[in-house]
Image: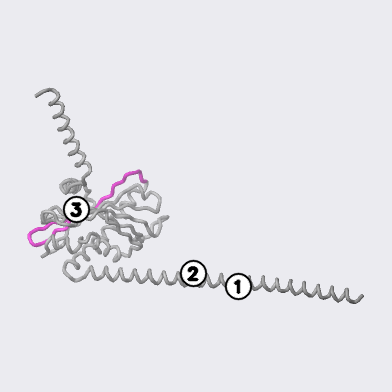
Amino acid sequence: MSSNEEIKEKKEIDSQQNETNNENNNSEPTQENNIELLSKQENQYAKHFVIDKIIPNINLLNLYNLLFSPPGKFINYILNFRGDFQIEYNLDFDNISTQDNYPKNTKFSYKYIHPAAKKILFAPSQFNIEDKYNIVYYNENKLYVECSTFITGFMLMDTFIARGLYIIEQIENDIKINIKYDMEFIKANPFKKIVEDNSYEENNNTYNDIIIPQMEKILKGEIDINKILEEKEKEKNEKEKEKNEKEKEENKNTNETEKNKTNKKDDKIELEENEDSFLSDEFQTNLWIYYCSF
């Protein structure tokens, strides 16, 4: 092979390699990447907060379909149940179609206002929160649900990220749910111990008193989550409708008031103009009589 042919062949190989690399760089993280990441995180979470719960006679795929398909509906239900408000949902990308008979991973987030569980000196009564979720269906025996919580609206709230990790496993005919919770401080916080203690206490109550019991009731068929969410959506729409009608009525009353003011102003101007006209006519008449008297 001549040197020119070798150079040409090498260029073609390099070109093909570059195209392959570009395709890999532009592709979304694979299922394997997510699984590897969460497997590492599973062992990195601190042991401050661990929940182990066995729910009997349930299949993992059925659990996924009841709680997380479509994604976010269980979390939406919990937020409403807990008393959070102004809830906004965002689905980052929807990959719930099946691949090799298993759902793909999916990401979504919620923004909402959360009332403080208890009053803390100088702290606000409510917080602005964003929860970012990553759900990875490992296989028919394992499911990961990761949540990163970001809090704003008060000083030092940007110094930490609260992280929760659900590890849901099929153990024969039962489901084992292990929930780990930890806090990552990304900046210095002089109240770190207070923040940790309050956060662990509130989340311990939330998981044990709200999330797990409600999850069990839904899985047992005691609660129809779809029906409840539909009623909540209907109630929300009715409130929005009432609000819009009230605003419309207020605007109508405001317009009527402004219109009445304008009419009164116009009537006053017209009256003044008529008075001026009358005075002018009267003056001319008197002037005419005066001249005629000579």
Gap between marks 1 and 2 measured at Cα:
18 Å
Secondary structure type for disc 2: helix
Measured as percent of width and height from the top left, residue 223 is found at: 21, 70
* Residue 286 versus residue 78 in the image, above or below: below
- Residue 241 percent location from the top left of the image: 38, 71
Sequence-wise, the earlier of marks 3 and 1 is 3
What x and y, as percent, mark residue 93? 24, 53
Between circles 1 and 2, the one closer to the viewer is 1
Image position of 201 (left or right of 36): right
Q: Earlier in the sequence, mark 1 or mark 2?
A: 2
Which residue carries the number 1 mark? Answer: 263
Pointer 2 residue? 251
Which of discs 3 and 1 lies nearer the camera? The answer is 1
In the image, is residue 180 part of the stretch drawn in magenta?
Answer: yes
Circles 2 and 3, Cβ within 8 Å, touching? The answer is: no
| Residue range of the region highlighted in magenta in the rendering | 167-189
SS for callout 3: loop
On-image quarter of the N terminus = top left
Work out whether residue 176 can be spotted: yes
Q: Position of residue 117 (x, y in %)?
A: 34, 61
Q: Which secondary structure type mostly characterizes the magenta part of the structure?
A: strand
Q: Is residue 218 magenta?
A: no
* Residue to which mark 3 is pinned: 105
Q: Is residue 5 left or right of residue 285?
A: left
**In this view of the protein, can residue 49 be seen by the observer?**
no
**Residue type (three-letter) at the residue carrying disc 3:** Asn
For label 1, the SS is: helix
Nearer to me, 112 or 292 = 292
**Residue type pointed to by label 1:** Asn
